[in-house]
Image (cartoon, grey):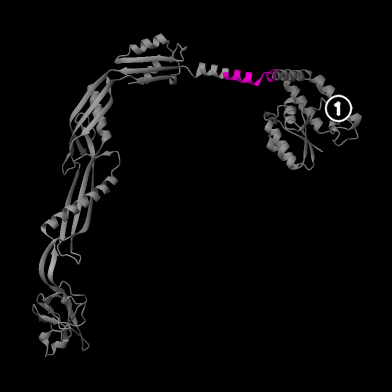
Amino acid sequence: MKKISVNKSDDAAIIVEKIIDADVDEIVLIIPRFSHLAESLENFHLLKREADAINKKILIESVDTRVIELAELAKIEAINPFFVKNKKQFSDIVPKKNVRSAPAVKKHSNADNDLENEEEFLKQLSSESFESGENGIRHNMMRNEIFKKENASEISDADKEGEKWSFFKKIPIKTLGALIILGVIAYGAATILPRADIKIVTKKLNWSYNDSVITQLSAKPDYTTVTIPNQKFTATKNTTMSFPATGKKQVSNVATGTITIYNSYSSSPQPLVKNTRFMSPDGKIFLLTKAITVPGAKVSEGKIIPSSIDAAVVAEKAGAEYNIDPVKLFTIPGFQGGPKYNAFYGQSKSAMSGGFVGELAYPTTADISAATKKISDSLQSDLKTSLYAQISGDFKIIDGATSFSILNQTNDTNVDKDGNFSVFANGQMSIIAFKESDLIDILKQKAEAENSDYQVKSYDIQYGVARTDASGRMSFPVTFNAILSYKIDADQLKRAVAGNSDIDLRKAIFSLPGLDTANVSLWPFWVKTVPKNINKINVVID
């Protein structure tokens, strides 16, 4: 068995570590008076639980009746070494052959010295082992007698304290709970419940502004001129859209395309007149649309390097049969029979197209007009969505503040295979917006400047259509109707009436200038004085 002395400041976790580190299965914990362990029963339950988990037995020695009581509640064996009730309570402590006489205890004149004497005595106890048998019991009894004589007054005080607590234990739980509830109610009635409610209705005035407002870029809010700043937002967008052509007409169109003409004849340039014929391998004739000159070939080390030039051609006849695929070799029939026939030739790198004979769709004037409106509406919608996404919610946009224009538009009247023509347009939109809070503020300032004893209580505002110019200036009519109430400072009133009697409170309220009606009440009904705490004074001004 091993004895472990516990310091007053040791918590349960530290003591558990000491129990775990001890190399024996049975441990005596010597706990002094006023130990932190005695602050909670849970501490003793923790000691018991941890000791049982590692199969160790613990015994508690203490002169503190609180410690003994908590230990027993936690089912831990506990003893006061100076009040031995059972001869066998120390029989499992390892005996010593030589019995020392009980240490002399010096008597001190104050409580602090008594505590020091007790702690010294416990230290001596922790360094000794009790003997078994009659000699050991006699030894313990001797110590008990010494401690009883020297600490009679302290034990007496402890007994008195115990008697005081035992008195409360005799009170029925329901009665004790009722007393506590009554105490809480009494405390709340005295400190929490009292309050003053003051409801004031002041005199009112109607005020209106029905005139124009001016907004300008970088302007400062001014209630005298009713001017506020604005901000201009601008965005551009272009798009191409296809539309059905509803017109019908008989057409005879020739195929068109481009050929590359080569000169491998000589270094001299070769002029070709307009309508010079070029023939495909299947005999289809295409004509130059204008006169050209084929540059001379290059001669390098006796070899001729052909030169070339691109030229536009049209089919000799109308019809879709001339819409031919790319051709590797076009000959010039005009050179046939001479040396230039094989030295001058053409090649098409893309197909000929546009050849057609028959009825063909085309966009009428109405088609183009409808297409222009539709593409304009589409651009406006897209630009408005884009701009509104850029403008924060504290800006106000009214009718007339938005401008839109088509910067340029191109109508391609050639219809595709599906009978549609296309329109390209580039549009721009600008929006001038202002912060409504700026306008409300200057109108309130204007109303209150004209009625110095009143303040704006509520208002209603309506806007007319805006007019803008290129400089970013915008003006618009506005109708502002406000209800003004006489100004009363609620916080100042609270401070003025705090602590007043019921009569003085009513005198102060009903003598206020600008008062229309008032309702004053103190709560609960028995309260006759306004609370001194202004947080318990509720003032509502309408």
The residue that disc 1 covers is: 140
**Quarter occupied by residue 518:** top left
Report the residue at 71% width, 33% height from top: 44
The quadrant of the picture occupied by the N terminus is top right
**Nearer-the-camera pick, 84 or 10:** 84
Q: Quadrant of residue 125?
A: top right
**Could you say where residue 346 lies in the image, as x and y percent from the top left?**
17, 81
- Residue 133 horizontal side relative to residue 282, left or right: right
Q: Main secondary structure of the magenta part?
A: helix
Left or right of 83? Residue 207 is: left
Magenta residues, start to end: 167-181
Vertical placement of residue 21 versus 111, above or below:
below
In this rendering, position of residue 45 left or right of residue 270: right
At 27% from the left and 30% from the top, the residue drawn is 441
* x and y percentages locating residue 362 in the rendered image: 13, 63
Residue 300 belongs to the span the image colors magenta: no
Q: Is residue 110 visible?
A: no
461 or 335, nearer to the observer: 461
Q: Residues within 10 Å of mark 1 (few under 14, many from 20)?
A: many
Image spot of residue 400 (x, y percent): 18, 41
Q: Nearer the viewer, residue 172 or 104?
A: 172
